[in-house]
Image (tube, coloured by chain):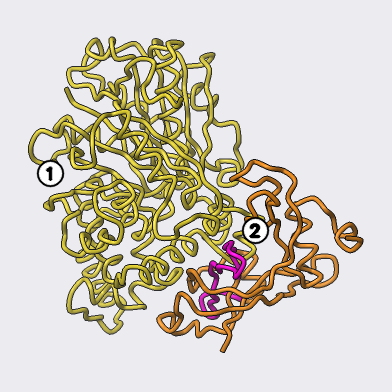
Amino acid sequence: MAKTKLGRGVAVVGAGMSKFGAFPGLATRDLFVDAFKEMLASVDKGFDARDIEALYIGNFSSDLFEGQAHVAPIMADWVGLTPRPATRVEDACASSGVALREGIIAIASGLYDVVLVGGIEKMTDLPTARVTDTLATAADVTYETPAGFTFPGLYASMATAYMAAYGAPLEAFLRVGLKNHEHGALNPKAQFGQRISDIMEARKASAAKKGRPIPTWEDEMAFLRDERANPTIAWPMHLYDCSPISDGAATVLLVSEDLATRFSNAPLFVIGTGQASDGATHDRPTLTGIPAAQRAAQMAYTMAGVSPADIAVAEVHDCFTIAEIMATEDLGFFAPGEGWRAAIEGRTARTGDRPINISGGLKSKGHPVGASGAGQVIEIWKQMRGEAGVRQLPGALRFGLTHNVGGTGQTCAVHIFERR
Amino acid sequence: MSEASAIGTAFTGTAFYNYLKEHQLMGSRCPHCGTVYAPPRPFCPTCLAADLEWVELSGAGKLASYSIIAVAPTAMLEAGYGRENPYCSGVVELAEGPRISAQILGVDVAHPESIVVGMPVRAVFIERGEGEVRKTFLGFEVIA
């Protein structure tokens, strides 16, 4: 019989991230140190970092991005934590969501009381074509990449299947990008923390400075529909449908539930964790959703004993705008085929009834792939503790959720957190 | 069976591409539940049986999803594609049931909206590279 409960409870008592962006001259270890320092400062009652017993570090492909493999011990070393066990977890873009789950399971097993979970990626040293090739290694290189599929291409193909099945217009995707840039503009850690309107003004100013004709767009949607301003990457996904190439790191401190209040005035209790795997994109029963996400979500909801309606704040894996729309359906926030309408109606905005990706999401905050899952937890930590500043959601946020996808859904990890 | 033996009887990616070189689209079939798999699988995920058999597929199918790709990976750049010459990749649902990824030919890449999910397609074999690096890729073309 499948077990639906952890052996014992686990809580988040600290969380911190580096800024996400493009940082020439900084390596993953430098970004990890930034994240670690912010995590230390976030532990309300302070603690001795030597109490950390083990590290689980999510990383997709430092091997290809930086020419450096075996990164977990380096991270441990750089924050002075050797000889503690340090394990790299690789599940593509879900690497640190899965590292979080491994850390939770390690504490639930009773072996450790205090575990550091991290996520790291340094992508911007390579030219775009090499980044595209590296990301494509998260797909099936025997049967998907020979078809010419890139990562944007695979998600774009899910978008055409979705459009055909549900009649979704291109506008739905553009609205997700527009919304996540609005959110990211309120996040000082975001890589592209500018509203689309800010980007339009910058383009006009740049043209004027260069003595070129100043472009005119009626509004943001006109800008996003302009192929010169928002070129096709893999139709129907355009530049502002795609998360950027990013560097970044994030860390989360986990302790056993009984120790939580010794570390924190306001811990987040991990009440649900789910993870699932799947085959290549073409080999799934549906192309308009991600079965591994549906399954991971169901596992997490069952463990937590909550339903989608209970979730007050969610960070979902919007590597592409279609991915956010599918996520809101896979997580049960909207019925299949209804996510695109919710996006157009503004329901997923900060001011809507189902706020999604208040951090700006991967689209605006940035997507250093191995760090993204842990990065999502930082936003949930801030929101649920009332520390999100100008982007703080109102009211008591009792339940929060993170949804981290690897590849096009070969892996998905979902976590649910509670403030008590 | 002699031909299959020459190419390789194990359900590997190499065998699949060796068959493609001979312009044969091959899958595997579970003798217990009858499900056909393409690309060929060594294990039936339904029955967990390992005694699957090769089956040649008709190459007929319909388009299940697609994308017009403008930012190409290195391999497609080398084949002459890119921003100025985008190409179509897609998922095809084969007449025998399984779905497979492939390049899609015979579509108007300048007008992606003209491409319709459900369009009938048939398998073609795309040759790329010269000499030792020559390789046959699976493609599908839209049936006019």
Q: Which residue is mark 1?
A: A390
Alpha-carbon span between mark 2 and mark 1: 55 Å
Q: Which residue is mark 2?
A: B36
SS category of the residue bearing label 1: helix
Q: Residue at left 23%, top 33%?
A: A306
Percent of width and height locating residue A347: 16, 56
Q: Is residue A181 above or below residue A69?
A: below
Q: Is residue A72 above or below residue A142?
A: above
Q: Residue at left 27%, top 74%?
A: A209
Q: Residue at left 23%, top 38%?
A: A307
Q: Is residue B97 magenta?
A: yes
On the picture, is A238 further left or further right than A311? right
Q: Amino acid at mark 2?
A: Val
Chain ID at mark 2: B
Chain ID at mark 1: A
Quarter of the image containing the C terminus of chain A?
A: top left
Percent of width and height locating residue A117: 41, 27
Q: Is residue B73 above or below residue A249?
A: below
Mark 2–mark 1 contact, CB under 8 Å?
no
Q: Nearer the viewer, mark 2 or mark 1?
A: 2
On the picture, is A358 further left or further right than B5? left
The single residue placed furthest to the front in the displayed view is B32
SS category of the residue bearing label 2: strand
Relative depth, front residue between A260 and A43: A260
Answer yes or no: is residue A26 visible: no
Question: Which hue is chain A drawn in?
Answer: yellow
On the picture, is A332 further left or further right than A405? left
**Residues behind callouts 2 and 1 on a single chain:** no
Question: Which hue is chain B drawn in?
Answer: orange
Q: Is residue A342 above or below residue A101?
A: below
State how many labels appear: 2
**In the image, which residues are magenta?**
B81-102
